[in-house]
Every structure is written in structure tokens, then in C-alpha cells.
Image: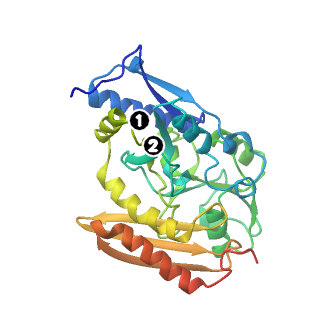
Amino acid sequence: MTLALPTPSAPLRIGTRGSPLALAQAHETRDRLMAAFGLEEAAFEISVIQTTGDRVQDRALREIGGKGLFTREIEQALLLNGIDIAVHSMKDMPVLQPQGLVLDCYLPREDVRDAFVSFHEGGIGAVPQGARVGTSSLRRGAQMRLRRPDVEIVEFRGNVQTRLRKLGEDVAHCTFLAMAGLNRLNRADVPAQAISPDEMLPAVAQGAIGIERRADDVRVAEMLAAIHDGPTADRLAAERAFLARLDGSCETPIAGLAELDGGTLRLRGQILRPDGSEALEDDGTAPVSDGAALGEDMARRLLERAGDGFFDWR
């Protein structure tokens, strides 16, 4: 059966958040589909959907619902047939999808590293005693407190421009962003220094774009298969299994990174107390096909070591 491709009169509707980064990711998805099927731009329609996480900017994510804040409204539009696909930053995605939706397409992963951003001289090792560090990420805050208990963590949300403005107003000495986002936005002007994963292990699935669809949409499934990146899927299978076993949310500081070397997958995992007073780490390898099992086993071992109450604030 011939695949019914989208046309200007019946475009493929791409759902996304409205931030510059989210739009860049939606455009990358569109451009890859255009190239794969020889389509023109008019065969696609970008539909911007505002999420709870976008609307509420003055409170910490953990105070307004945790994971899913940047996806729920988009997934609802997908379920109601208002859009055909949804483009997500995978680090924002809950490990379970709503019934009727499938997440089985990933674009090639970008730089996984965190970026230290500051207008002041020196890198992360030169942050002054007692400095204010701006971040909305519980993971980054805990990782920074672990190495520097003296710093003050202040809530810091918004897009790149908003965060740079806050730095310029001395709301904080420094902040963190994802290198992947800066690269996708071509923001070489941002005073950023990449942080090695050996120094700051990134969020699970950082740098990866996922594309969600309705489970019964055969046409879209076939189109997305043409742009799906297998190595990214293999890495995320391990990382997201690790996250799922830990029941990760915005209230649990968790880091994880899977890397491939031929047929072998290496997974590094870290859990931290929210106040940064303690971190537990693990490191393991397995055949790529056993990546999910490796993630689950690593999470189980860390939870056994952590004991009850590890993720509670002290």
C-alpha cells in the first residue's frame, strides 16, 4: 500500500511548546521528514501549545506538579486528534505515556553535557564563597551543593535570554544550561563552558529529542521510522529504565548517562539527597540489547544502598 504523504492542503500537524528551543526542535523534526520524503515545507504545520510549565514561571517545578508539566497539554491535543505528532525534549518526558500514545522515534542525540554560564571570569571551580547559583533543576542544585555546600541556590527559570538578563542583573553569579540547547539555537554568544560528565553527570536523556504519536496511526509510524536514530534509542532505553525504577520526578535528583562502544553499552548513574549532602553512584556495562535490564539493576542497587528517606529534604 502506498504511503499517503502530507500535502499543503492536508499537512502533518506538529505539536510543540512555544519556546525558541522547542520550536528549533520542531523545525529539525520537520526538516528531517522533508528530506526523507522529498516534501515541501508547506506540507507541515507547526502547532504551538502552551503547557503548565510554560505558564507558571514564578514557582519551582516541584511545587506545581513535577514531571509532565511540559507535556500534558501537548499529549492531550495528540489524543484528541488536534495534532499528528508531538516533539519533546526527552529529559522532560515522564517514563510512562498516556494510554493510546507511543514514543518510539528519537532524533540523533546532541551534546549531553551541562554548560556553566556566567559573565564572571573563571569556570565552575572559580565560583566565589557564598555565591548565588541560579537553577530550577533539583539535580543541578544538589550536584552544586555537593561540591560547594557554601553556595546559595536560587530559583532560576525562563528561556536563554531571560536567564542571561537575570545574570546581568546579578540575581545570581552563574547558572547552568544544556549544551544541546545552546547548540540547537546557535547561541555561541552565550558565555558558556561545557562541563565534562565526569564532573557533572547530566540528566537522564539530556540532549535527546523524542517524537510521540498515536499508537494506531500507521501512516505516521511509517514516516517516523524513516528518521528514527537507533543508537539514541539504545542509550535512552538504559537511561529511562534506570529512571523508571527510581520513580524519578522533579523531587528526586537523578543523573544518568549511557554511552555506546560497539556492541557494549556503559551506564553511569547517580542519585543525590536534595540538599546535596550525599551522592551515591554506580557504573556498569552490558551488551546493548541488555541496556534496559542494566538500568533497572543499577537503580535497584542504588536504592538498596540509599535506604528509606534518602530523597527527603533534611
Q: Nearer the viewer, residue 279 or 37?
A: 37
Q: Earlier in the sequence, mark 1 or mark 2?
A: 1
Q: Amino acid at mark 2?
A: Glu
On-image quarter of the C terminus: bottom right
Q: Nearer the viewer, residue 11 or 58?
A: 11
Q: CA distance from mark 1 to mark 2?
A: 12 Å
Question: Dots 1 and 2: beta carbons under 8 Å?
Answer: no
Above or below, 228 relative to 174: above
* Residue depicted at x 53% and y 57%: 114
Q: Nearer the viewer, residue 226 or 214?
A: 214
Looking at this view, name the residue that lies furthest to the top: 9
Q: Is residue 50 visible?
A: yes
120 lies left or right of 220: right
Provide residue 76's location: percent of width, then percent of height: 58, 39
Instruction: Give the label on residue 29, or none.
Output: 1
115 lies left or right of 297: right
**Image-quadrant location for residue 7:** top left
Above or below, 290 relative to 104: below
Provide residue 275's location: percent of width, then percent of height: 71, 73
Q: Amino acid at mark 1?
A: Thr
Residue that numbered label 2 is attached to: 212
